[in-house]
């Protein structure tokens, strides 16, 4: 009789561990999806910042060129 109880407890423990493992896998999938979305957001933000920086650099070059051609350019040189 104690052998049957031990077998039943082992089976129950195996089933419970299986349920726990399935739950953990679902959580890991959800976590992986959330990390993927976060990486996409960070990537698009980085691209936007890089684009803003490129536009600012081009604008600065325009201002420098205008400053070098404007009144008093010979005095500054």
Image (cartoon, rainbow, N blue to C red):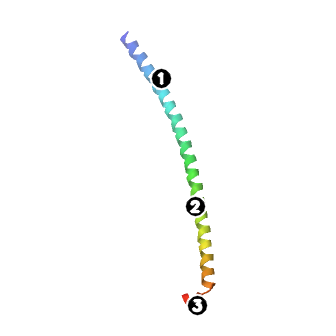
As drawn, is 23 to the left or to the right of 61?
Answer: left
Q: Distance between the residues labelled 3 and 1?
A: 87 Å
Q: What residue is shown at x 52% (from left), y 35% (from top)? A: 27
Q: If the image is split into quadrants, where does the C terminus sit?
A: bottom right
* First in sequence: mark 3 vs mark 1: 1
Q: Marks 3 and 1: which is nearer the front?
A: 3
Q: Residue under label 1, please give it.
A: 15
Q: Which of 76 and 58 is in front in this view?
A: 76
Residue 4 place in picture, x, y as percent: 40, 12
User: In this view, which residue lies farthest toward the front?
Assistant: 71
User: In this view, which residue lies farthest toward the left?
Assistant: 2
Q: Name above or below for residue 29 compared with residue 7.
A: below
Q: Name above or below for residue 76 compared with residue 36.
A: below
* First in sequence: mark 2 vs mark 1: 1
Q: What residue is shown at x 60% (from left), y 55% (from top)? A: 44
Q: Nearer the viewer, residue 72 or 4?
A: 72
Q: How crowded is mark 1: few (under 14 residues within 10 Å), some or many (20 or more)?
A: few
Q: What residue is shown at x 52% (from left), y 40% (from top)? A: 31
Q: Name above or below for residue 37 compared with residue 68.
A: above
Q: Residue under label 3, please give it.
A: 74
């Amino acid at each position: 009789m104690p052998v049957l109880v031990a077998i039943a407890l082992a089976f129950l423990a195996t089933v419970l561990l299986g349920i726990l493992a399935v739950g953990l896998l679902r959580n890991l999938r959800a976590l992986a999806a959330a990390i993927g979305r976060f990486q996409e957001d960070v990537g698009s933000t980085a691209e936007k910042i890089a684009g803003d920086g490129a536009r600012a650099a081009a604008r600065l070059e325009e201002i420098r060129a205008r400053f070098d051609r404007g009144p008093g350019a010979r005095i500054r040189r």
